[in-house]
Image (spheres, rainbow, N blue to C red):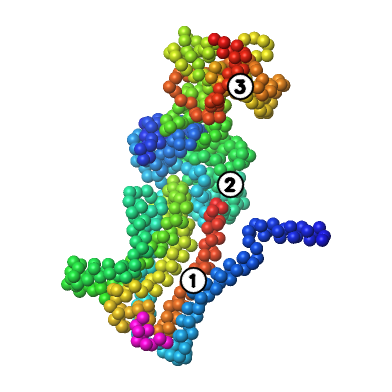
């Protein structure tokens, strides 16, 4: 063995020690993880697409272009278009208050923000039924003014906002806490007002985290089933969102159509995931730079 | 601009961060706030800046109550401990931030550019205006932070641990540079530090703080030569403490008289504080206090010797000439030629390293005839 070869094997040995496990252990672990992912995640996703095209491309497009599907898609987009911006404002405000200020009841507010995560979606829906139902105090009052909340679009929007509330706030709070408030203090001591400080200093520092939160929030807003199912009333062409429409189609023994619509939602999820991983790569880089700072 | 702090107190969750602090900083003065962590020095600085609101008391800028103005309008240049540079902005935009944030008489963009270039020249960072903070070294960030604070033409410059996060070499250079900058620009400047060397070298006046109160406010010479309290004595420079007894206007250690002025201290127990240069070894056979050498180490041209002396084996550190050969466990005689005596009831800065050993062994003292009474 030459000196160079000896040096090379010694180097390999050191590397192996540094990682800790031999190639067999590593291979087995990776295979296990991949097998689990394949069975639990990739196979179901494939099934959705296979079933969707199972009766031919014609059935697939027919299902997608039927008026009920289109109206469900429209409603889903409308609900997301209202719920996501609303939670963007609420989430940023809540995160800002919690991360940058000290006040009594902060821990309680944090717990409240987590509430939608902890409560089952069905219960979340029932909360609104109790609040605005025919036997509640608010329901008949609003009814007398001609405002319909339950079994109508407003109810669906409210339930969706409730369910997706934590996504943006939860994403921002740790990020803002880690960054502290000395940059804001610097901006104020340099003469900047509150809004200027917020838009020029606070917001740019959390923009990637914010975008990430918006994406997650959007994915959930479009996919939410439980809470929406309770408040919507399943009126076809009026209060059916995509997830509800899929369920109805499935129960009507129109499996191919159900899977066709489901593939639309799955596609949406895949796009969200793709954008998310692109952002994450970007986000990780800028986070690392901030840590170096 | 003169800054006057009048009877300011501030509590955090029942703990007094500032307890009735009063301080006047003259126009153009360079003042160091020096103290251990938790002494309230940063709280005082932040209170002057307006970043903290005092519970009681008032901060005056030139005899005007500063709290009448918003923080934004106080005209305070604040340099944060970790610089707090805007990480998503280039150096140029960081420095220009304060000028662009002005509501009234905001300069033209071309004037802002020119001003930024001048400031970059002043802090010796010309050519780095396109960099992001993460692409700068610690010392460079420090200077960007300073340039950003100077850009608003502050009437008071406040620096929180300005050199705390830098390595020793960069620190020394920046210290000298800041002193020169102060002499050129003449801002009223306060800076917080826990490094006594930094405070004594840089400041016109040093304010020593402890437990939310000012222990002494004086020139570096006065702080070192005539410390007002045992805390100041032990916080600044090296020191040893030994208990003595006052009687008939004289201080005695185990009934041996120590030739020192004790002022108007009442009879009873007191503490003698010694600097390494206040003790010398007796080499001419004259009278002295016997002691046993515990350790020696070489410091520059001197030899720092630790001895145990007195009945309770008090530890004293002093400097001896490096030419003298001194071994561990050697018996020596020392003479006290300086130091200050403080009355009982005043606490010094806790120096754990000098705590007397608990397992007292008086064999050597008996052999010396020291315990024969």
Question: Is residue A219 visible to the viewer in this orientation of the structure?
Answer: yes
Residue situated in front as seen by the camera: A280 or B221: A280
Residue A196 image offset from top left, x and y in percent = 42, 55
**Residue at the disc numbered 2:** B138
Please indicate whether residue A140 sits to the left or right of residue B316 in the image. Answer: left
Residue situated in front as seen by the camera: B118 or B67: B67
Q: Which is more N-terminal, label 2 or label 3?
A: 2
Residue situated in front as seen by the camera: B240 or B11: B240
Query: Are dots 3 and 2 on a single chain?
Result: yes
Give the residues in magenta.
A247-257
* Chain at tag 3: B
Disc marking residue A273: 1
Location of residue B198 with respect to A203 vertically, above or below: above
Residue A144 image offset from top left, x and y in percent = 17, 72
Q: Residue at x 66, y 28 (%)?
A: B297
Please indicate whether residue A268 sits to the left or right of residue B56 in the image. Answer: right
Residue A244 image offset from top left, x and y in percent = 35, 79
Dominant secondary structure of the magenta stretch? helix
What is the CA distance from the residue labelled 3 to the residue labelled 2? 42 Å
């Amino acid at each position: 063995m030459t000196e160079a070869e000896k040096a090379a094997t010694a180097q390999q040995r050191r590397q192996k020690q540094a990682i800790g496990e031999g190639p067999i252990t590593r291979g087995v672990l990776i295979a296990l993880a991949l097998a689990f992912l394949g069975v639990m995640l990739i196979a179901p996703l494939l099934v959705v697409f296979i079933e969707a095209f199972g009766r031919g491309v014609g059935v697939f497009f027919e299902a997608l272009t039927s008026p009920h599907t289109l109206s469900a898609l429209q409603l889903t987009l409308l609900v997301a278009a209202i719920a996501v911006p609303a939670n963007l404002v609420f989430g940023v405000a809540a995160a800002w208050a919690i991360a940058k200020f000290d006040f009594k009841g902060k821990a309680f507010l944090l717990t409240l923000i987590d509430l939608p995560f902890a409560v089952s979606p069905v219960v979340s829906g029932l909360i609104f039924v109790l609040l605005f139902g025919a036997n509640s105090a608010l329901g008949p009052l609003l009814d007398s003014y001609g405002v319909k909340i339950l079994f109508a679009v407003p109810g669906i929007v409210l339930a969706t906002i409730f369910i997706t509330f934590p996504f943006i706030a939860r994403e921002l709070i740790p990020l803002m806490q880690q960054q502290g408030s000395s940059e804001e203090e610097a901006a104020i001591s340099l003469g900047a007002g509150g809004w200027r400080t917020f838009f020029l200093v606070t917001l740019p520092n959390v923009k990637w985290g914010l975008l990430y939160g918006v994406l997650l929030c959007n994915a959930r807003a479009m996919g939410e089933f439980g809470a929406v199912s309770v408040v919507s009333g399943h009126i076809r062409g009026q209060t059916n969102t995509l997830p509800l429409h899929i369920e109805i189609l499935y129960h009507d023994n129109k499996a191919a159509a159900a899977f066709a619509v489901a593939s639309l939602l799955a596609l949406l999820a895949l796009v969200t995931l793709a954008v998310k991983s692109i952002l994450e790569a970007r986000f990780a880089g800028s986070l690392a730079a901030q840590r170096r700072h | 601009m003169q800054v006057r702090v009048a009877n300011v107190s501030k509590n955090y969750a029942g703990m007094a961060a500032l307890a009735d602090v009063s301080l006047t900083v003259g126009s153009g003065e360079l003042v160091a706030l020096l103290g251990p962590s938790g002494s309230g020095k940063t709280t005082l600085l932040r209170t002057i800046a307006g970043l903290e609101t005092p519970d009681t008391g008032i901060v005056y800028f030139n005899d005007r109550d500063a709290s009448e103005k918003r923080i934004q309008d106080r005209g305070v240049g604040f340099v944060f401990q970790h610089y707090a540079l805007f990480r998503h902005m280039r150096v140029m935009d960081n420095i220009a931030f304060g000028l662009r944030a002005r509501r009234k008489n905001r300069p033209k963009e071309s004037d802002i550019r020119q001003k930024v270039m001048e400031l970059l020249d002043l802090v010796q960072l010309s050519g780095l205006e396109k960099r992001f903070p993460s692409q700068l070294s610690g010392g460079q960030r420090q200077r960007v932070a300073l340039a950003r604070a100077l850009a608003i033409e502050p009437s008071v410059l406040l620096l929180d641990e300005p050199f705390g996060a830098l390595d020793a070499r960069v620190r020394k250079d920046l210290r000298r540079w800041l002193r020169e900058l102060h002499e050129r620009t003449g801002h009223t400047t306060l800076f917080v530090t826990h490094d006594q060397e930094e405070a004594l070298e840089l400041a016109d006046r040093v304010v020593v703080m402890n437990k939310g109160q000012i222990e002494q406010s004086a020139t570096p010479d006065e702080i070192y030569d005539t410390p007002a309290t045992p805390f100041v004595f032990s916080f600044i420079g090296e020191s040893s403490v030994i208990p003595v007894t006052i009687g008939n206007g004289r201080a005695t250690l185990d009934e041996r008289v120590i030739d020192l002025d004790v002022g108007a201290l009442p009879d009873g127990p007191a503490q003698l504080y010694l600097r390494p240069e206040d003790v010398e070894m007796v080499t001419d056979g004259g009278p002295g206090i016997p002691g046993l050498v515990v350790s020696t180490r070489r410091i520059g041209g001197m030899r720092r010797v630790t001895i145990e002396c007195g009945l309770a084996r008090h530890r004293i550190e002093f400097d001896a000439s490096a030419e003298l050969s001194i071994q561990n466990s050697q018996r020596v005689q020392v003479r006290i030629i300086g130091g200050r005596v403080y009355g009982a009831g005043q606490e010094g800065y806790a120096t754990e390293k000098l705590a007397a050993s608990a397992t007292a062994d008086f064999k050597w003292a008996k052999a010396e005839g020291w315990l024969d009474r």
